[in-house]
Image (cartoon, helix red, strand yellow):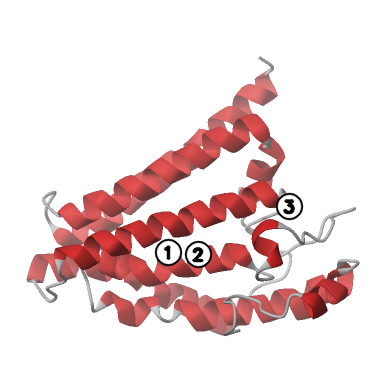
Amino acid sequence: MRDDAKLSSFKAYLVPVIIMVVMGLVLFLPAGSLKYWEAWIWWSIISAMTLFIAAYFLKRNPELLSRRMKVKEKEPQPAIIRFLSFLSLFAFLVPGFDYRYHWSAVPVWIVILANALVFLGYLFIFLVFKENSYASTVIQVEKEQPVITTGPYAVVRHPMYTGLLIIQLFTPLALGSYWALIFSLLFVPMIMFRIKKEEEELLLRDLPGYADYANTIRYRLVPYVW
């Protein structure tokens, strides 16, 4: 195996491991206990899916992983999006304190159902990645990039954000917290702002065929809603 291939493999697994460690600290330090069973379920789902996606696309489509590792936007995000992004992080911090101080009493069946929906949201994102190898963490259009119109893209124009929205909205309940929902709901306007910016300032302007696609697929994020 070439040195650059080894490096690519190392990076592909390093990022999921960092995510696992950081999320573990974010969940368990505020909780002050490793007995936080709701967090163990959620953390296991996120960790397993993140590692699976890394392993799958390292073998099938390493170019996608390379795009996913890009984090710097060519143009800075508006202040409102940065502010909402910061506040939405509290959706992951509050549940730990909620567990420690017993602010919420979320029934077990809701916790299990919410975790199942988090898993389905992550699975939906995996299907998006399989359909669109140009999916990236940054807003950009690459040379000869086609408009994807199949799979999840035949339902909504931004299915990756749909999956992220499912994960974000149900994570507080999966972690046993009602209070964290307040911050999680801020993810909705943040995503809407980002999608409008992405379409108006990039896709409609630089991606050939996107305007026709947008006229065909009416909904951006949630079918029959928006």
Hey, what amino acid is under mark 3? Tyr
Judged left or right of residue 210, residue 55 is left
Q: Which residue is mark 3?
A: 134
Quadrant the N terminus occupies: top right
| Foreground of the two, 33 or 215 | 215
Tell me the number on the disc at residue 78.
none
Q: Which residue is mark 1?
A: 167
| Foreground of the two, 40 or 110 | 110
**How many numbered dots are placed on residues in this image?**
3
Hey, what amino acid is under mark 2? Leu
Quadrant the C terminus occupies: bottom right
Percent from the top left, x then y, of residue 44? 31, 45
**Helix, strand or loop at disc 1?**
helix
Percent from the top left, x then y, of residue 96? 20, 64
Vertical placement of residue 164 versus 135, above or below: below
CB atoms of marks 2 and 1 within 8 Å: yes
**Helix, strand or loop at disc 2?**
helix
Distance from Cα at disc 3 to Cα at disc 1? 21 Å
* Quarter assignment of residue 206: bottom right
Q: Which residue is mark 2?
A: 164
Hey, what amino acid is under mark 1? Ile
CB atoms of marks 3 and 1 within 8 Å: no
Vertical placement of residue 89 versus 81, above or below: above
Percent from the top left, x then y, of residue 209? 89, 68
